[in-house]
Image (cartoon, rainbow, N blue to C red):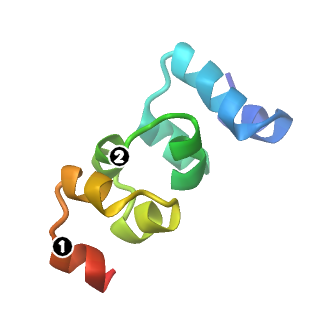
Amino acid sequence: MDLQKIKIGGSPKKAIQQLRAAGYTISSLRLAGYTAAELKEAGYNAVLLRDAEYSLMELKAAGYSTTALKQAGYTISEIKNA
């Protein structure tokens, strides 16, 4: 399955759900160009995205709450300064 073709072929949320069902990892989705915001919309939490090496800036831009970012292991200081 070509991740780029799926990304181009439809809504990101639907494509991500199909890829998740097919067993693709978040890291694979990241390498295919899916954004933190797209993964958030598809139901992924900040902890999983941090583990897949999305940056704090990407997670903040995606709209994760301070609480979600704290649960992902960031300190208040890191969150405020990002």
The spot of residue 17 in percent (x, y) is: 60, 24
Q: Which residue is mark 1?
A: 76
Residue 6 in the image: above or below residue 69:
above
Give the quadrant of the C terminus: bottom left
Residue 41, numbered circle: none
Pick whichever, 5 or 26, lies toward us: 26
Three-letter residue code for mark 2: Ala
Residue 36 in the image: above or below residue 8:
below
10 Å neighbourhood of mark 2: few (<14), some, or many (≥20)?
Answer: some
Residue 32 in the image: above or below residue 66:
above
Residue with the most extreme bottom position: 81
The spot of residue 71 in percent (x, y) is: 21, 50
Give me the C-alpha separation between circle 1 and circle 2. Answer: 21 Å
Question: In the rendered image, is residue 14 in sight?
Answer: yes
Residue name at image x 42 percent, y 61 percent: 59
- Secondary structure under the numbered disc 2 in the rendered image: loop
Residue 52, numbered circle: 2
Pick whichever, 71 or 5, lies toward us: 71
Number of numbered discs visible in the structure rendering: 2
- Secondary structure under the numbered disc 1 in the rendered image: helix
The spot of residue 20 in percent (x, y) is: 53, 22
Residue name at image x 38 percent, y 59 percent: 65
Q: Is residue 1 left or right of residue 43?
A: right
Residue 3 in the image: above or below residue 57:
above
Residue name at image x 55 percent, y 14 percent: 21
Tell which tag, 1 or 2, sits nearer the viewer: 1
